[in-house]
Amino acid sequence: MFRQASRLVSRSITAKSATNRAFSTEVPSTIDSSFVEAWKKVAPNMDPPQTPSSFMKPRPSTASSIPTKLTVNFVLPYASELSGKEVDMVIIPATTGQMGVLPGHVPTIAELKPGIMSVHEGTDIKKYFVSSGFAFLHANSVADIIAVEAVPLENIDASQVQKGLAEFTQKLASATTDLEKAEAQIGVEVHSAMNAALSG
C-alpha cells in the first residue's frame, strides 16, 4: 500500500515539474473570446468583467548583476525616516531572528518584532529601536521597512525603560482579565527588548 502511494506521489510531482508554470505577472493578459461572446448574450449593455491579470503590473526588472548598494525606505505612520537611502546593509529584528539584508537579497516579507534595526553605511552604523512592523525585500535590491514605532537608540532613556519594565511586570502580575494580561505582556516584551538593546 505504501509503495503504491509513493509511486502515485512521485508521478504527480514529476508531472508537475515537467510543466513549468509561468508567474502570473509574466503571463500576457488575454481575454477569452468565447467568454466575451457568452457575456454579451446575457448582458449586452454591460462590459465584460476584467480578470485580476488585467490589473497586475509586470514585475520590476531585475538587474543582471547584483548592485553594490541596497536602497532602503524606512517609514513610520507619521514620518519617513529614510527615503531612497543607499546603504551597504541593514539588520532587522525579524520574528524568525536577526536578519541581515545585503544587495541582491532574495525577495522576502518579514514580520518585525521589538528589537534593534541597524543601518550600515560604510563604517557608520545608525541604530533604531523598532516596536513591530514589516520588511518587504524586493528582487531589485530595494528594502521597504514599515514600523509601527521607531526611535533612534541614543534617544532612549535607560532609567525610563527600567521604570516602564517594573510597571508592566507589576501590571502583568495583578491582571485579572485577558485584555489586561495581553496589554501587560506586550508592555513587558517591548520594555525587555529595549532593555536588552541598551545593555547589549
Image (cartoon, rainbow, N blue to C red):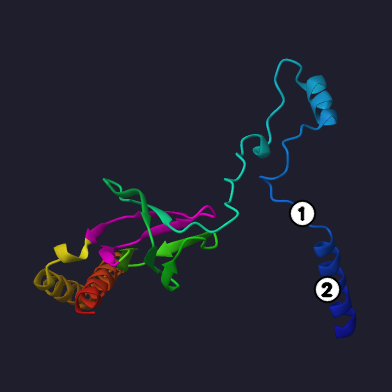
| Secondary structure category for the residue under label 2 | helix
- State yes or no: residue 145 in magenta: yes
Q: Which residues are magenta?
A: 123-151
Q: Residues within 10 Å of mark 2 (few under 14, many from 20)?
A: few
Inspect the image, locate mark 2, and give the three-letter code of the amino acid beneath it: Val
Residue 21 is tagged as 1
| Secondary structure category for the residue under label 1 | loop
- Give 122 or 77, whichever is nearer the viewer: 122
Residue at 15% over, 62% down: 155
Q: Residues within 10 Å of mark 1 (few under 14, many from 20)?
A: few
Q: Which residue is mark 2?
A: 9
- Side of 30 where 148 appears, left or right: left
For this orientation, the residue located farthest to the bottom is 2
- Side of 64 where 183 appears, left or right: left
- Side of 180 where 72 appears, left or right: right
Residue 171 falls in image quadrant: bottom left
Residue at 76% over, 34% down: 30
Q: Quadrant of the N terminus?
A: bottom right
- Give 115 or 106, whichever is nearer the viewer: 106
Q: Vertically, is 124 above or below 59?
A: below
Q: Is residue 55 visible?
A: yes
Inspect the image, locate mark 1, and give the three-letter code of the amino acid beneath it: Arg
Instruction: Give the percent coordinates (x, y) of residue 113.
Output: 36, 67
Of the residues tagged 2 and 1, which is closer to the observer?
A: 1
